[in-house]
Image: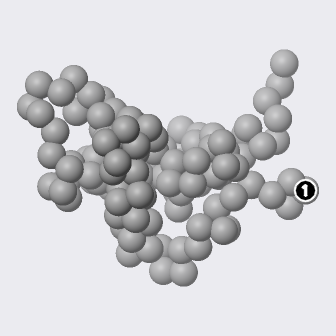
Amino acid sequence: MSKSRRTKACTFDKGTIARIISRDGDTCIFCASGRWPLAKKDFGAHIRDIAHVVNRSQGGLGVEQNGVTACRSHHQLLDNGNKGLRAEMLDFAECYLKEQYPGWDREKLVYKKGV
């Protein structure tokens, strides 16, 4: 079964992933900030992910302007918000992307059918 247009549009392809990792210096932006320290033995701190800023479930596109490098632990904190950090971490990620991409706009990063 082939993927839908929305699924394809919301998925980071290999080239996009490589550009995001390069842009972020191959480092979790949250670890690099020092604002959300992790325990040294936290297994997820050594696994690198690409996190959507606008969630895939909300139609967040798989483009450079919508992704940041995050270690697995910070990615889970961002996605699950189980420690009440989600809003603060999203604000940080958005500010980071605004520095990288002047004119960054959350609304432009949402999949629109037929566009």
Q: Residue at x 54, y 38 (%)?
A: 14
Residue 75 at least partly seen: no
> Hey, which residue is sitting farthest left in the picture?
40
Quarter of the image where one finds residue 2: top right
Task: Establish if 47 lies above or below 33.
Answer: above
Kindly state the secondary structure of the residue where label 1 is placed. loop
| Res 100 quadrant in image | bottom left
Image spot of residue 62 (x, y percent): 61, 48
| Residue at which label 1 appears | 114
On screen, residue 90 versus residue 111, left or right, reads left
Residue for point 86% across, 54% down? 113
Residue 29 horizontal/vertical position (percent): 29, 53
Residue that sits furthest to the bottom in the current view: 103
Identity of the residue drawn at 40% across and 51% down: 86
Q: Quadrant of the C terminus?
A: bottom right
User: Can you say whether 90 is above or below 42 in the image?
Assistant: below
Vertical side of 47 occupied by 113: above or below: below
Asked if residue 70 lies left or right of residue 115, the reply is left
Q: Position of residue 78 (x, y in %)?
A: 40, 45
- Residue type at mark 1 is Gly
Q: Nearer the viewer, residue 91 or 108?
A: 91
Q: Quick check: can you spot residue 65?
A: yes
52 above or below 115? above
Question: Quick one: quadrant of the N terminus?
Answer: top right
